[in-house]
Image (cartoon, coloured by chain):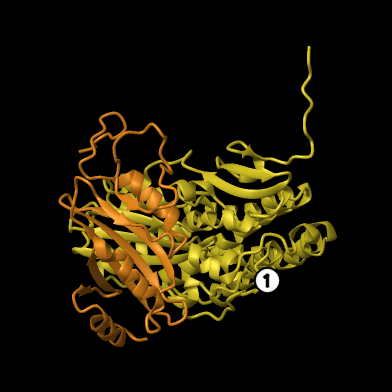
């Protein structure tokens, strides 16, 4: 038998599949990588494994039902998603909700943002090879989940918002629970820095890796902390304040480095800002009703309504086209994850496979949000 | 630029386009064959500078299709809704905008598979979310699928 000699001097591009069952893709995302050696030449995302036709389902659903579908998009910022639909419907009905509702919605928004970011932080550490952070991140995440459970009965997919207000009033011990959590969290957040932010192994793997320029961030529509780390001021809470955000003082976290570490740091700093927002509001929840009565069948006037909110991943938009029926004519969800994913190819080109894990972690992709 | 000034400027630059307004946005409607020209002006004109396209939506209105583009200028802070009307339902076609806005590439692929609208000169027009062997365009209003769609009423 003749064995053919292999020419080792020649390098060839080859393909490799990452996912759909890869732990660091955080869900069923398949990436088709074109590699030369270990260097990534091209990343082609294949998505749609959890496509549930939510936009099509919305066309058959009433406005109250749509809210429950938006929980299933980005399940880690479910309250913001619910709020976007409610605000769009309220905008169509020209309804003004009570101050109490606005403040409670804002507090829960920020709690939800912290819970999403703590979970992201834990998982990010685990992607980088540190199991400890996963356990620590989930500890704080769990505390917020318990507050949610006490408030509305659900831990993850809350559906606490309804058009016109909230489903229930907050429990009497809500303020105490939130304050206890903040007291605990403010002591623990510096630990996050000790564990990861100042860890030499971690910083070596994230600093200068996965650069996204401001121009590219805008062109690809990247939003949220991922874009603000590239210097793109896109915080919807600042640009178009909704609920009670015009009442509070907070900083829009902007970094200009645009690398993985900047994206990481933007989220850590955002948690401090969220803590500050909650502290400003928690003692000032106005008395009053927790909802405005709406008709059982909501019909929006003919027209189109766009409402965006700042979810934990970026600008989440709801675009409703109404023809004055009980179901919307067309609903489109502008999901932040979808836009953030589209920039992945640009960011990852020239990086190594191990860096791709860091890049995906810092983009904080949630797959059901992308697939819709 | 404030809303009135923007509106006047738009009318000056696009005298033939039709305008409408709602509480939030100025809506500019154009035909599908002029889309590239219009968007290039909106992006490059020093008074508009719409550099950020944050939402692209396909809509089926039974006799025609509409593609809605939500645009924002990160420099000047104003927003605009641009609608492109595609009259030909049998063979819907429109020029791609992926060379102007990178975000359009994936969004256009989604509209292509959901509505069957062809984006001319798109670099990679394939199905995105649906399986490759999927037949029909599910987001169209006349789409009929007795297996996957259960009518509730």
Give x and y (percent) for residue A91.
30, 69
Tell me the quadrant of the picture where the N terminus of chain A can be found.
top right
- State the residue position of label 1: A257
Chain A tint in image:
yellow
User: Looking at the picture, does residue B47 appear above or below residue A275?
Assistant: below
The part of the image, by quadrant, that contains residue B151 is top left
Colour orange, chain:
B
**Residue at far right of view:** A200
Give x and y (percent) for residue A334.
41, 58
- The residue drawn where x is 67% and y is 60% is A210
The part of the image, by quadrant, that contains residue A351 is bottom right
Q: Nearer the viewer, residue A111 or A85?
A: A85
User: Looking at the picture, does residue A113 appear above or below residue B130?
Assistant: below
Q: Nearer the viewer, residue A305 or A189?
A: A305
Secondary structure state at the residue bearing disc 1:
loop
Q: Nearer the viewer, residue A280 or A366?
A: A366
Give x and y (percent) for residue A349.
64, 54
């Amino acid at each position: 038998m003749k064995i053919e000699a292999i020419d080792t001097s020649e390098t060839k591009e080859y393909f490799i599949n990452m996912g759909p069952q890869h732990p660091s893709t955080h869900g069923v995302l398949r990436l088709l990588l074109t590699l030369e050696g270990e260097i990534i030449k091209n990343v082609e995302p294949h998505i749609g494994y959890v496509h549930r036709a939510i936009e099509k389902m919305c066309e058959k659903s009433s406005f109250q039902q749509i809210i429950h579908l938006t929980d299933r998009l980005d399940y880690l910022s479910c309250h913001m998603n619910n709020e976007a639909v409610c605000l769009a419907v309220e905008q169509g009905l020209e309804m003004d909700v009570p101050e109490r509702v606005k403040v409670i919605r804002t507090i829960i928004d920020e709690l939800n943002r912290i819970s999403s970011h703590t979970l992201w932080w834990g998982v990010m550490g685990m992607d980088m090879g540190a199991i400890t952070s996963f356990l620590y991140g989930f500890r704080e995440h769990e505390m917020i989940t318990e507050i949610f459970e006490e408030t509305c009965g659900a831990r993850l997919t809350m559906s606490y918002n309804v058009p016109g207000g909230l489903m229930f009033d907050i429990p009497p011990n809500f303020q105490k629970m939130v304050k206890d959590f903040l007291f605990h969290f403010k002591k623990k957040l510096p630990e996050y820095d000790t564990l990861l932010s100042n860890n030499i192994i971690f910083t070596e793997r994230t600093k200068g890796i996965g650069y996204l320029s401001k121009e590219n961030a805008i062109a690809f529509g990247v939003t949220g902390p991922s874009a603000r780390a590239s210097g793109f001021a896109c915080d919807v809470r600042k640009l178009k304040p909704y609920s009670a955000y015009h009442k509070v003082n907070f900083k829009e976290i902007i970094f200009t480095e645009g690398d993985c570490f900047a994206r990481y740091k933007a989220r850590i700093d955002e948690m401090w800002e969220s803590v500050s927002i909650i502290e400003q509001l928690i003692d000032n929840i106005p008395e009053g009703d927790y909802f405005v009565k709406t008709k059982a069948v909501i019909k929006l006037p003919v027209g189109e309504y766009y409402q965006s909110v700042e979810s934990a991943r970026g600008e989440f938009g709801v675009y409703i086209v109404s023809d004055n029926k009980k179901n919307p004519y067309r609903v489109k969800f502008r999901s932040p994850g979808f836009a953030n994913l589209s920039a992945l190819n640009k960011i990852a080109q020239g990086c190594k496979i191990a860096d791709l894990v860091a890049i995906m972690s810092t983009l904080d992709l949630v797959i059901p949000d992308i697939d819709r | 630029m404030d809303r009135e000034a923007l509106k006047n400027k738009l009318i000056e630059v696009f005298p033939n386009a039709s305008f409408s307004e709602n509480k939030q946005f100025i809506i500019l409607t154009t035909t599908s064959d002029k889309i590239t020209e219009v968007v290039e002006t909106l992006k490059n004109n020093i008074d508009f500078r719409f550099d950020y396209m944050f939402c692209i939506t396909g809509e089926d209105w039974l006799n025609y299709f509409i593609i809605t583009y939500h645009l924002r200028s990160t420099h000047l802070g104003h927003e605009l809704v641009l609608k492109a009307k595609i009259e030909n339902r049998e063979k819907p076609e429109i020029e791609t905008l992926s060379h102007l806005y990178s975000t359009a590439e994936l969004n256009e692929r989604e509209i292509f598979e959901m509505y069957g609208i062809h984006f001319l000169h798109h670099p990679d027009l394939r199905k995105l979310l649906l399986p490759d062997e999927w037949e029909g365009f599910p987001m169209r209003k006349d789409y009929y699928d007795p297996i996957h769609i259960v009518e509730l009423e």
